[in-house]
Amino acid sequence: SSAILHPTTGSRFGYLGHLSLRDVEDNHDALRNVSAIDGAAFLPHVMTMQRPSTPWQYNSPIRQLEEPVAVGAEAKDADGRASPTRQGGGGGTASKASLAKQMPMPANYVRRIRRRAQNSRTGPVDYRQQLADLKLLADSASRSGSIYQALQAYHKMGVVLDNQGMYPEAIQKYKQFLSLCISSKNTQGEALAYNCLGIDTFKIGHLDEAIQYHNKHLELADSTGRLIAHTNLGIVFQAMDLPEHAAIHHQHAIEYANRMGAKDAQCFTVGNLGIASAAQGDLQTSRICLQYHLNAAQKQKQVAPDTKFAAHTFKSVSTNALHRLGQVNTTDGRFEEAASHFEKALGVAKSKNDQASEEKAGAMLGIAKGLMDFDQHCAALLGSTGGNAGPAIDDDAAEPAAAEAGGCAADHPPMRRFAFRTGSDDALLTPPFAPPSAGAVPNGMGAAPPRCARRNGPARPLRRPSSPSPPHSFWAAAYTAPHGGTPPLGAPSCTELGAGVRPASA
């Protein structure tokens, strides 16, 4: 019996820690890994800042779940300014807190007891009263010389402010927490402080400071902490539009996830690498990584308990992954696969009653199907006309309309518009529909451009459109001015030119 009660060499919590090893007796790597004993668990969301588990002795409030970070084109707000992350408003604070309380219990026995204590704790609901109480505890602990109790109080204040979205105020509390950890040589608390500071400075847009804090966290962390630090560094570099640096850190995170044998960590680390690869233009690697991320998330859903939290989490992950796969396939020209992914995302969004995701998936599905049939539509148009030019606009029919519109026949020679299609690399074709010579402008409009009595300066020649990128065909239009007279219907008049409506420059 004494052998049973004897604490294991890898256990951190004595006999209680030994109880937490019952489910992993056959996994020798987990027995040797203190991080696995500590019960670290990850959610499968990609582009989400990761936080390490707080020490089990800390009676910290339950932290709200981190939202996925929006980078690149997704980070543009209504004014077109870049925002590194989507910060939730105050209206969703209650729903986020209730969702955080529904998280599954940790595998570790001690942490399960701690989670139950956090869920059942009663205290002031108003965060200002919580801060006042914690401030009083921190001051009294500092006066009594109990640095350990004081640093815990400052960490709790930072968590309360984080839950309210007050990141600048939380940074000040975390800095006080860090200074106490350094003075007391508390390495575990120091690494936790660097992680909290790195995430909050990232949220307020101080990306350089965030990189410094995450690098310091990387220096002090264990295997789990290094996985978290590399993941956060990759997200910060992605927000700085440096996908090459981000991909390197995500690869290191995958390496640590493989060493730990953590399937949940492999899920989001590989997905993050897929997003960084897409930003680099490596669409094949991005497609493979995102597909692995989606499959891994679906496997986790099968083994996860049937709870409201699990259903909400995996539906959000599936919708996000399907959207990203559809976008990558659309960029790569795989329109049929992209339409299939967007259609699945539409179905998941409907089952989740997520109107925003449903509208986005429906719009992207229409775009993918339109691009899928665009080449056939252009080929049908080319076949119906045999590639010949379209009919010219009748000058005689256009003159009365131009005169009624206030045209200036005395100032401009007549202009005839020709519409035609081309699928080659030839530029603007002019009558008799032959490729123009090098350096020429349409119909001799370069040597002596016409002038307008009510316009300052000579009329600029029309810009010749650049060569289309195969295989898409396109419509082009040309104005010719071989004779004197009234411009046709649709040509710019002197009034329009005087108002600032000018042809494009060459």
Image (tube, helix red, strand yellow):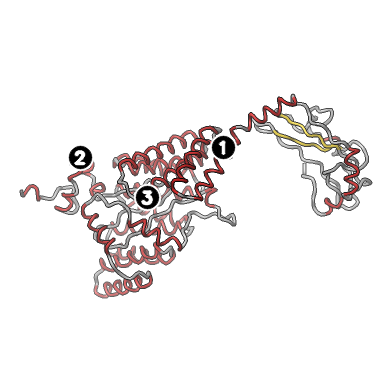
Q: Which residue is mark 1?
A: 368
From the viewer's perspective, tell me whether residue 313 is left or right of residue 54.
right
Q: Which residue is mark 3?
A: 229
Q: Residues within 10 Å of mark 1 (few under 14, many from 20)?
A: many
Q: Residue at x 40, y 66 (%)?
A: 172
Q: Which residue is mark 2?
A: 28
Say which quarter of the image contains residue 114.
bottom left
Image coordinates for residue 380, horizontal then vertical, percent:
68, 27
Between marks 3 and 1, how big is the CA–CA gap?
37 Å
Q: Residues within 10 Å of mark 2 (few under 14, many from 20)?
A: few
From the viewer's perspective, tell me whether residue 228 is left or right of residue 395.
left
Q: Is residue 470 visible?
A: no
Image coordinates for residue 258, horizontal then vertical, percent:
32, 39
Between marks 2 and 3, how big is the CA–CA gap?
26 Å
Q: Earlier in the sequence, mark 2 or mark 3?
A: 2
Which callout, 3 or 1, points to the residue nearer the camera? 1
Q: Earlier in the sequence, mark 1 or mark 2?
A: 2
Which callout, 1 or 2, points to the residue nearer the camera? 1
Name the residue at the left extreme.
1
Which callout, 2 or 3, points to the residue nearer the camera? 2
Q: Residue at x 37, y 70 (%)?
A: 126
Between marks 1 and 2, how big is the CA–CA gap?
49 Å
| Secondary structure of residue under mark 3 | helix
Image coordinates for residue 84, horizontal then vertical, percent:
49, 54
